[in-house]
Amino acid sequence: MEILFITHKYPPSVGGMEKQSYELINGVSKYFKVHTIIWDNKSSIIKFLLSIPFKVKKMLKENPGISLIHLNDGLMAGFSLKLKRITTIPVTVTIHGLDIVFPSKLFQRFIVKRFKEFDAVIAVSKATAEECYKRGFDRNRVFVVRNGVDTEMAHMYKKLTYKSEMEKMLNLDLSDKKLLVSVGRSVRRKGFSWFITRVLPKLDPNIIYVIVGPTHPHIFKINFILNLLPDGLANKIGLAFGLGLDEIDIKKALQNSSISNRAFYMGKLPFEDMVQVLKHSDLFVMPNIKVSGDAEGFGLVALEAAINGLPVLASAIEGITCAVIDGENGFLVPAENEDLWVDRIKRLLEDRDSLKRFGEMAKHYSMTNYAWDKMVEGYISVFKKILARGEQKAHARVPSRIHDYFESMDSLMLDRYVKKNA
């Protein structure tokens, strides 16, 4: 089997989808011959997207052994709808979340509707699969393959002096503090500002909250421009470009005197530093909220926390419930229920030794069930099923006249045999 992968999310770019794409392609290459069409992150992305059909034609001509094409997200699928017309080989696509729920009638009618033509849709979570079903996708063509996590993180050593480095960065003595941490882009659905304003003030003063994630130097200017546009259009632009508009509300919330020196926005940190923050924290919180037209497809950051032995407390919402299994590698709380969030955090932090033991259990569970190899095996299984279906269809396409001919010949020969031996 030879497979052609097409993606615009790939290292050296950094992110969850980039990591998933890298691990998938390299994982599958250990078992089958792999070909790739990958955006170089330097040339025009629009030019790359528009050139996909032409590049595929060239790739198939040069490599006639390719038996399946895989598109690694909905954007690739949107610009590859013609592939089903220019080739007879199966085409599959991974759907992550926003690429199926994006709140545009035109997108839903003319793009998502066409996704049904692909031979298989691989959803990263049950929640994402449910969104496909709601839109009338054939259940026999939708498969759930959960994302994996980099288990090598578990083997990174805990730098004992890092806490003092954090104290310098935060300008705060952490010796008697309990540390909560969130990681990710400050998009609305992450609920960071909601947590700061609704939950943190009700917690003990010795509980500190830290956010690790990229900031945008011009976010206030961008927001000013968006405010000049109709709300619907502004919302679509924010979602399409993944703008961290919650950063504005976070910074406003940080000015509240009631949480002075209790909440910190550290911005984007080097990967090694981010891991150290996880290893020196007491609890990872993922306080996602419901945002119309957006969805958390999976929740990779929760797994990264668990892999580092850090217990996870997350909203029981959307794809998070596929990454965080309540009582196994974390705990789930109803989204936007501030009283339950406060109560659960207080009870978990009462016994830090028990919490630490649970963190070790969560680490083992996540390493066992979410290694990248598991994800790769899931994709290979889907690819094989789709190719097998294609072979069955090929056999079924034999003209019925040929079948009728052989059946009539069999009947004729049987009649002659009976008469001869009567």
Image: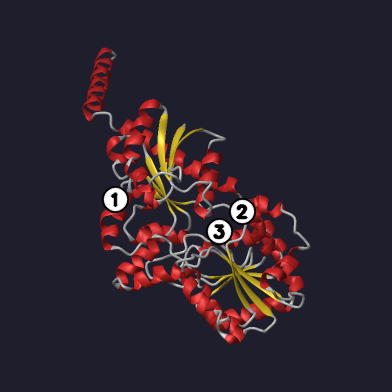
Rendered view: 59 above or below 341: above
- Choose between 5 and 132: the one closer to the eye: 5
The kind of residue on which mark 2 rests is Asn
- Choose between 87 and 40: the one closer to the eye: 40
On residue 114, which mark appears? Answer: 1
Q: Secondary structure at mark 3?
A: helix
- Image x and y of residue 255, in percent: 55, 82
Q: CA distance from mark 3 to mark 1?
A: 28 Å
Looking at the image, do the residues carrying marks 2 and 1 touch, with CB atoms under 8 Å apart? no
Q: Going by the picture, which residue comes out furthest to the top? A: 420
Q: Secondary structure at mark 2?
A: helix
Residue found 31% across the figure and 35% down from its top: 87
Residue found 34% across the figure and 48% down from its top: 46
The kind of residue on which mark 1 rests is Arg
Location of mark 2 (residue): 369
Disc 3 or 1, which lies upstream in sequence?
A: 1
Disc 3 or 2, which lies upstream in sequence?
A: 3
- Choose between 4 and 68: the one closer to the eye: 4
- Choose between 205 and 401: the one closer to the eye: 205
- Image x and y of residue 60, in percent: 37, 30
The kind of residue on which mark 3 rests is Leu
Residue found 74% across the figure and 71% down from its top: 354
User: Residue 174 sits in which quadrant?
Assistant: bottom right
Looking at the image, do the residues carrying marks 3 and 2 touch, with CB atoms under 8 Å apart? no
- Image x and y of residue 52, in percent: 35, 40
Q: CA distance from mark 3 to mark 2?
A: 13 Å
Q: Secondary structure at mark 1?
A: helix
Label 3 or label 1, whichever lies nearer to me, is: 3
- Image x and y of residue 111, in percent: 29, 53
